[in-house]
Image (cartoon, grey):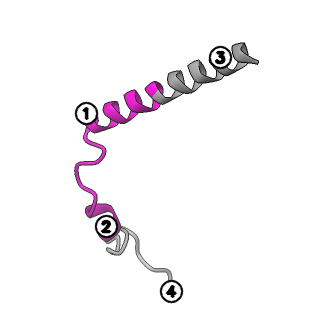
Amino acid sequence: MASSLIALMGLSLFLGCGCWLFFLWAVQRGEFHDMERPKHRMLEEDEREKPKK
């Protein structure tokens, strides 16, 4: 019982550190730099596409 608890605690610590490192990597790449632009960009019309009539 105790060995499985220690193994699960180690696994959760490993996964938690992995997620934290992934988050730090994304911040360094600038993934969270501009949070407002994508939601406004989807409302803009693409001028390259011509509507079919």
Secondary structure of residue under mark 2: helix
Q: Main secondary structure of the magenta part?
A: helix
The image quadrant where one finds the N terminus is top right
Instruction: Identify the residue shown where x is 50% and y is 80%.
Output: 52
Per the image, the residue denoted by label 3 is 7
Could you tell me how far apart the alpha carbons at marks 4 and 1 are, in whole angstroms?
46 Å
The nearer-to-camera label among 3 and 4 is: 3
Alpha carbon distance from label 2 to label 3:
46 Å
Q: Residues within 10 Å of mark 1 (few under 14, many from 20)?
A: few
Sequence-earlier tag: 2 or 3 = 3
Circle number at residue 28: 1
Q: Which residue is mark 4?
A: 53
Mark 3 → mark 4, Cα distance in angstroms: 64 Å
Residue 42 badge: none
Amino acid type indicated by mark 4: Lys
- Element under disc 3: helix
Between 37 and 28, the one nearer to me in the picture: 28
Relative depth, front residue between 37 and 32: 32
Amino acid type shown at disc 2:
Arg
Q: In the rendered image of this protein, does residue 1 appear above or below residue 43?
A: above
Task: Please identify the residue farthest to the top as the structure is shown.
Answer: 3
Question: Which contiguous range is marked in magenta?
Answer: 17-40
Q: Position of residue 51 (x, y in %)?
A: 45, 80
